[in-house]
Image (spheres, rainbow, N blue to C red):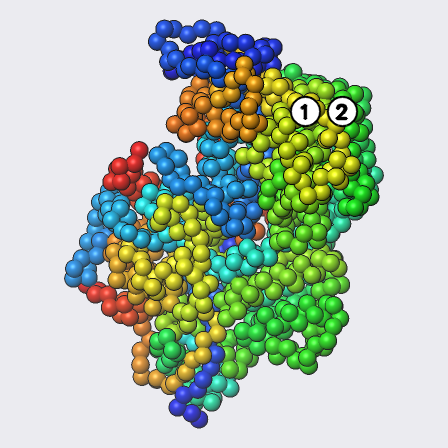
Amino acid sequence: MSEFIIKNGHVFDPVQGIKGDKKDICIKDGKIVDKVGSSAKVIDAKDKTVMAGAVEIHAHVAGPKVNLGRIYRPEDKLFSCTPTKGMERMGSGASIPTTFKTGYEYAKMGFAVAMEAAMPPLFSRHVHEEIRDTPIIDEGAFPVFGNNWFVLEYLKNHEIENTAAYCAWLLNVTKGYAIKVVNPGGTEAWGWGLNCLTVNDPVPYFDITPAEIVKGLIEANEYLGLPHSMHIHPNNLGNPGCYETTLDTMKLAEGIKAKNKFGREQVLHLTHTQFHSYGGTNWGDFESKAKEVTDYVNKNKNITIDTGNVTLDETTTMTADGPFEHHLTGLNHLKWANVDVELETAAGVVPYIYSPSISVCAIQWAIGLEIALMMKDPMRCYITTDHPNAGPFTRYPRVYKWLMSEKARKQQIESFKHKDKVLSQTAIGTLDREISLYELAQMTRAGPAKSLGLAAMCGGLKPGMDADVAIYNINPDKPVANPDDIEKAFSRCAAFFKSGVQVVNNGEIVSNGNKRTLWVNVKAKENPQVARDINEKFIKYYSMTQANYEALGHHFVPNPYAIEVDATN
Amino acid sequence: MTKVITDVICPFCGTLCDDVEVTVSDDGKKLLEVANACVIGTEKFLHSQSSDRVTKPRLRQEDGSWKEISYEEAADYTAKLLAKAKKPLMYGWSSTNCEAQSVGNEIAEIAKACCDNTAAVCHGTTLIAVQDIGLPSCTLGEVKNRADRVIFWGCNPAHAHPRHMSRYSIFPRGFFTGKGQMSRKIVVVDPRCTDTAKMADVHLQIEQGRDYELLDALRVALKGEWLPDVVAGIPAEKIREVADILKSGRFGIIFFGMGVTQSLSKNHNIDAAIALTKDLNEYTKYSIMPMRGHYNVTGSGEVFAWQFGFPYSVDLTRGFARYNPGDSSSIDLLLRGEVDAMFTIGSDPGAHFPISAVKQIAKVDSVCIDPHLTPTSGVSKLHVPVAFNGVETGGNCYRMDNVPIDCRKVVEPPVGMLTDLDFLTMVCTKLKKLKGVA
Amino acid sequence: MANSISINLISGRTIQQGVAIESGKEKPSYRTACGIIEMDASDLKKLGAWKNTNVKVTTDYGSVIVKAIEATQGPHPGVAFIPMGPWANSVVSNNTYSTGMPTFKGTPAKVEVAINEPVLLGIELVQRQCGVKVG
């Protein structure tokens, strides 16, 4: 296979503690190596920034609700179509790109891995078909567990071993990556048009609380020793005052230690924290509670978060928090799609326009940035937009610009119609911190990789790791003249290598690479009771047979990469 | 000796029953018996065994007779047809699997074709309405487990989706519906006293074509406002009675079909039905679901959408995807005489398009990929028979509620017969060469 | 008794149609299932047509010979039903009103007795109307 040497670049690698030193990066047979032979192809990265491929910890890029968004929003394709060009298939979609476009856009920004944030298990075949049709980037998917009938029944009686056995079974048959929880209990309540807005609201009929669900799934996750922690979208998303529910949720992790062989240190990953950091009692006195939330996370080191930054675009919201979407359509009266999924979960889709002229949207924008700027440990805070909920992932470079340039933030604040309210309801005006390139590498590469339990494989440039290397047109030795240059540099990398194959050159796709589907293969103890319960529910309640539910043939996952977990002791 | 294959998926309609059992000979070559499928599904499986199947591609001659050719020659012909055409239409896709649909998309992109599926004559107008107003829906298991109000509007599952009522919508005993049929109230809206209506607690024998008015009247009745004495042939008291039945349930589902998608108000009917569903969610929990016809029309829509961005009537002629029903839709393209080559697969437009559109198909160079003899093959220039998907080859399909189920292969196809996927892959390779594409 | 009556024509699925298409559209069973028009008893009487005899159905879009049978899912006076297929599609409205969807349900039609005219087989019916030479 090919050998490459990337010379003269300024390397930012938190895994090895390299903070911009000029260093050569050597690639051989898909991995980073110490040195290569003289026949290696030389890539000159003089005056450029070199980082590992970025790791997307949470985005909605593949699956039924994503596609429902595509189907019901033909207008999302207006002016965003790209024609067939060379080896690039045609693409379309601004907030919900088609699968080919998704892969290309991530690769052009230097992303190596993306995690599909919510897979309804009944639809695993759909998620994997879309993952298969997303070129270049490695992907995994998180099945959802927080409203699953098996989980609700087992955790009502605090049966952690049975819960763990069921989770292992489900991860295996869906080729899933992690235990995802969305609006625990509330989405089952939504099956009757109801919801759970606090961690203590009981779920109708099942009579279990979100607190019991969350705590139980954390314990099951550690029982199994999975690479990632329980990954949660707490109750009460998006409502003024919701930060209290967020704190209540995070408190459930207190005192629990991570147990795994992957270097993961957190037991709870709180996702799109921006949406969960609201104070006030209504949209009039709506205010930021970013400080309260980040204070807690700063102190409690067994938690990681991602930001969920609002990008001030027209976008499409989509989430397994079905009741929230119904609430949202009541607010903005834009078309609402919903799918309740038997025994498992639900999904809702509603377009949304984050207009800079609306004070609430401007405050949301500020909160997302506050969170990143107030978090002390960049290895525990990752930059996302909960794509496409708070904005399209193609806006990440803009978010980086806002975080790395106080001038850019001030420009944006000055342009707001309700600038005064933004300054009074948030602390954004007081924050002068500028994220450095090294911190950016922590927040977009090393940090998420570690949180996902993939630290040995990606997120860094240590010899032995996958050769995912991104080169950006930004010279750390020159001060940034115009913050827009930051956005430009990170939008299109000068070159990107994925698993040792050059896939992007000067912002253009030059190879489709050989993407993999990452999944977690859990070897768990035999559990005849859980096996019987699964059997019974398929016969009685599911609309599909168990054999067909478990069918996930090779044509769905043509290039699987299994992370083995032995949970038999 | 024989063996029984279980968990077989029936490849006929959008109900996509997956509990069929097929008995085959030990060598896997003969299909002997089918259990659990409805009479239509049973016929599909058994007919695959008939000795009068066309097993080789055939090209129509000048004198109207057929000449057998090889698959290789057929693929050549098809690739050339697509390469030469300025505006080829690649239509159908609904009776084949997603893997084949995906290769078909690749072909369409290279050929710069218009591609469309049978939603064009089925639930296309539903898709238009969904794009205007959204879609509160659920999976069929939710209906089985929760629904206590079931409305069939402009559809006749007793005839079109025969096992739907026993598997999902009327009879099953689900988690919260342990009394089965007794847990549910059924309302049927249909201008005829259909076999489905015979199972209803209330049958509204609506004046044909007046669904929009009746849907609107129900929305009005929900709000307790004034109604005229009769709407769409239904007395106001009856409308109010039905509104109360709907409102008093704890989980309702509206199934709808061609009665509302194909009658004059088309997408406006569906818009009104979805609006009614949204209104009902102010009082209780309601969902709405289209009764998709072909067993994988939903899949075609899904694959088109994730690869091109639109669910049907996709125009790729300019090198990027465009969508505009009425302009880019099959019937209109044909009626305007814009199509200069026709490629049909997994469908039968010859039988199911208005004859004026079929006449256009007959005028141009054409390929029909279908295991059956059909009116489409009857007017096409090249007929390529392939293995029956879901019987002689497997592959992913999507049920009417968008749930993906991987169809199984239960028996070998006749010797030498290719699958859709095989043939399309050959065509794709040849087309790439003709177009000088890598 | 009239020479012809006006009815509102709709089209759709039947179980027999489903079985017939899977058996093969070239077979007579397809004609038996779909080359028919289901009419309400009162309409048959108005027309003066005997049950199970052939009639000619004409619309603005074409005409076709089908066998008139008594409605199996009636009563529905004024509405007549031809199962989906080439017989129905010889006469239904092709007008999509820019939605892409023809108006398969709700075409005004005229029905007349045509007791001596044959109902064609499915594929033949389409080939004839399209002028396709059959060798």
Percent across and percent down for residue C5 are 44, 86
B111 displayed left or right of B37: left
- Mark 1, secondary structure of its residue: strand
Residue A569 location in percent, x, y? 69, 18
On screen, residue B71 versus residue A475, left or right, reads: left
Quadrant of the drawing holding the N terminus of chain B: top left
| Front in this rendered view, residue C103 or B298 | C103
Query: Within 10 Å of the Cα at label 1, are there few (<14), some (14-19), or many (20+) other Cα atoms?
Result: many
Number of numbered discs overlaid on the protein picture: 2
* Circles 1 and 2 in contact, beta carbons < 8 Å: yes
Whether A471 is drawn above or below B42: the answer is above
Q: Residues within 10 Å of mark 2 (few under 14, many from 20)?
A: many
Image height check: is B167 above or below A114? below
Q: Which residue is painted at 64% across and 61% down in the image?
A: B275
Determine which quarter of the picture holds residue B288.
bottom right
Q: Residue furthest left?
A: B63
Residue A468 image position (x, y, % from top left): 49, 20
Q: Which of the labelled discs sits on residue A297, or is there none? A: 2
**Is residue A38 or residue A425 the one in the foreground?**
A425
Q: Are marks 1 and 2 on the same chain?
A: yes
